[in-house]
Image (spheres, rainbow, N blue to C red):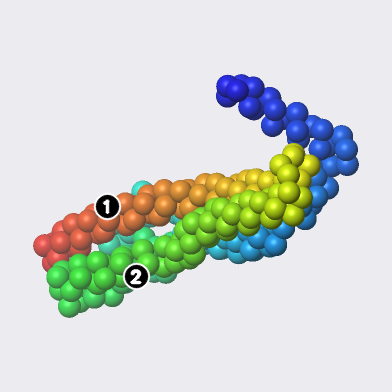
Amino acid sequence: MDFTTTIASIFNVLAQATNDGGVMNWLTEKYVAGGIFMHPILASLIIGLAFSFERLWTLTKARTNTKKFIVDVKKSLTSGGVEAAKRVCENTRGPVASVFYAGLLRYDEGLDAAEKAIVAYGGIEMGFLERGLIWISTFITIAPMLGFTGTVQGMIEAFDAIKEAAQISPAVVAEGISVALLTTLFGLVVAMILQVFYNYFVSRIDRLVGDMEQSSIELIDALYELKVKK
């Protein structure tokens, strides 16, 4: 069976499920047929999505126009000094503004102190951005493992059925094999859904961290120029 045929078969199954009473009814039926291991798989999906939505909300709030912010800070440093730049940071959301504010607070102690504060607070902000990702990664790993465990259980049930019937026939092993395939399917689907979120978050965080690092260098340069002018 080639890729095109496989995709066509999937769409045929979904279409048939919809015609027979809706996709949700079909999913419910398969969920019940999957046995006891479907419950922790579903729990993995729900908890994983909860962490994903929380990270999505946090990273959305962390987004800012970094280039415009840097320009505003430099203008404030030139026209009003450090205090004016602090006010710009206070009125701007996001990790870049927080890192800038931490550096500006230590400016009076010297450029070295300001730079150390920027580096230290940058690490704190990065940890805040990455918070919760470990749990999403955990459920990405656990979901297929639970599915494979359900597969083993289903195969055991199938062999027990063969033993009791003292014969091998499709009708005897069908229920056990169905459990085995359904748990594997749902476990892999859950892992794929969460993996998409995880990769997106890692990409967003890498971009934010890159902005923080580049912006911090520009702030240090601006503070140095301010000190030279004095």
Q: Secondary structure at mark 2?
A: helix
Left or right: 127, with 218 as reference point: right
Q: Is residue 92 visible to the viewer in this orientation of the structure? A: no
In front here: 41 or 90?
Answer: 41
Q: In this rendered view, identify the residue nearer to me: 185 or 58.
A: 185
Could you tell which of marks 2 and 1 lies nearer the N-terminus? 2
Q: Nearer the viewer's eye, disc 2 or disc 1?
A: 2
Q: Left or right: 113 with respect to 57?
A: left
| Quadrant assignment for the C terminus | bottom left
Residue at 57% of width from left, 48% of height from top? 188
Residue at numbered disc 1 = 214
* Residue 12 in view (yes/no): yes
Residue bearing mark 2: 124
Q: CA distance from mark 2 to mark 1?
A: 17 Å
> Where does residue 59 sit, x and y in percent of width and height?
49, 58
Q: For the point 18% across and 57% down, which residue is it?
A: 221
Q: Which mark is residue 103?
A: none
User: Label 2 neighbourhood size at 10 Å, few (<14), some (14-19), many (20+)?
Assistant: few
